[in-house]
Image (tube, rainbow, N blue to C red):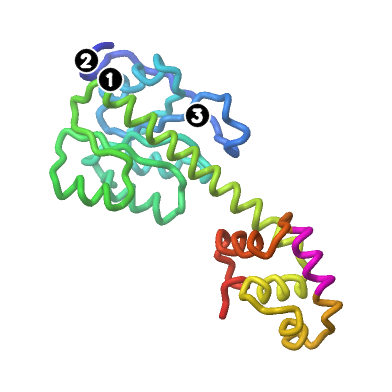
Amino acid sequence: MGGALTPGRDNVSAHPAACHRIADVVAKPSVIHVVDDDASFRVAVARLLQSSGFQVILYDSATQFLERLPVDACGCILLDVQMPGLSGLELQDGIAERGYLIPIVFLTGHGDIPMCVRATKAGAEDFLSKPVSKEILLGAVRRALLRSEAAHEHHDRLGALRGLVDTLTPRQKAVFALVVRGRLNKQIAFELRTSVRTVKAHRHEVMFKLQVRSVAELVSLADKLVAPDARAN
């Protein structure tokens, strides 16, 4: 398929598959979710993407997409703007509200500057006009996939850090919160009504469980988490 995408006639078989944590899917094909009410355009896009090694799932409406998409979906969305029912821009808002970590590339034959500005400000990876060339489309998809991978890695990293924090006892969490706020052992002991020796023991356990070797690393971890108990004044 050369030049701009053109409609196709045959049905394309797309195989839905759950996308797991990023560490588990590195060697698997990326999933591209194509949401467009134009069946012939969906076929043309799917053929192009599949020939480039991507896995494709097709949706004929924004509502169908929301009903089928797993919360931890990886990949990206190729999304039409004007569709019956829920529009592409409204779907973008719904995705943000649900906290999905999945970039969007808009594809439309009826776009304008205000639409593009709104979509971009809301975090769209790109806003392309139909017909679109193979090179431009694949470039936008690859950029979106890189952003998707980075977002999932960041999400997984935060999840792992929160898991470590959850291993702390209530008293250890209290010590953790005070340490990252700059309190000295004597001050912590006074606030928690315990001994300096006990504070030192808790502090050692906190650093051991959170896998850090310095207070600076501890503060950095707290900043990444933005945990309420570690950031409270």
Q: Which of the numbered marks, if any, corresponds to residue 16?
A: 3
Q: Earlier in the sequence, mark 2 or mark 1?
A: 2
Q: Earlier in the sequence, mark 3 or mark 1?
A: 3
Q: Is residue 208 magenta?
A: yes
Q: Amino acid at mark 1?
A: Lys
Structural distance between the alpha carbons of marks 2 and 3: 28 Å
Q: Which residue corresponds to mark 1?
A: 134
Segment colored magenta: 200-209
Task: Find residue 165 and report its horizontal and vertical position in percent.
Answer: 70, 61
Q: Determine the image quadrant of residue 137.
A: top left
Task: Find residue 23 and report its horizontal and vertical position in percent.
Answer: 61, 35
Structural distance between the alpha carbons of marks 2 and 1: 6 Å
The residue at 76%/65% (across/down) is: 206
Q: How many marks?
A: 3
Q: Determine the image quadrant of residue 102.
A: top left
Q: Amino acid at mark 2?
A: Gly
Instruction: Give the crowd class for mark 3: few <14, some 14-19, many >=20 residues within 10 Å.
Output: some
Q: Amino acid at mark 3?
A: Pro
Marks 2/1 in contact by CB < 8 Å: the verdict is yes
* SS state under label 1: helix
The residue at 77%/58% (across/down) is: 209
* SS state under label 2: loop
Instruction: Give the crowd class for mark 1: few <14, some 14-19, many >=20 residues within 10 Å.
Output: some
Horizontal relation, residue 92 to residue 160: left or right: left
Quadrant of the frame with the C terminus:
bottom right
Structural distance between the alpha carbons of marks 3 and 1: 24 Å
Q: Is residue 215 magenta?
A: no
Task: Find residue 171 and report its horizontal and vertical position in percent.
Answer: 77, 75
Q: Determine the image quadrant of residue 58.
A: top left
The residue at 82%/85% (across/down) is: 194
Q: Which of the numbered marks, if any, corresponds to residue 92?
A: none
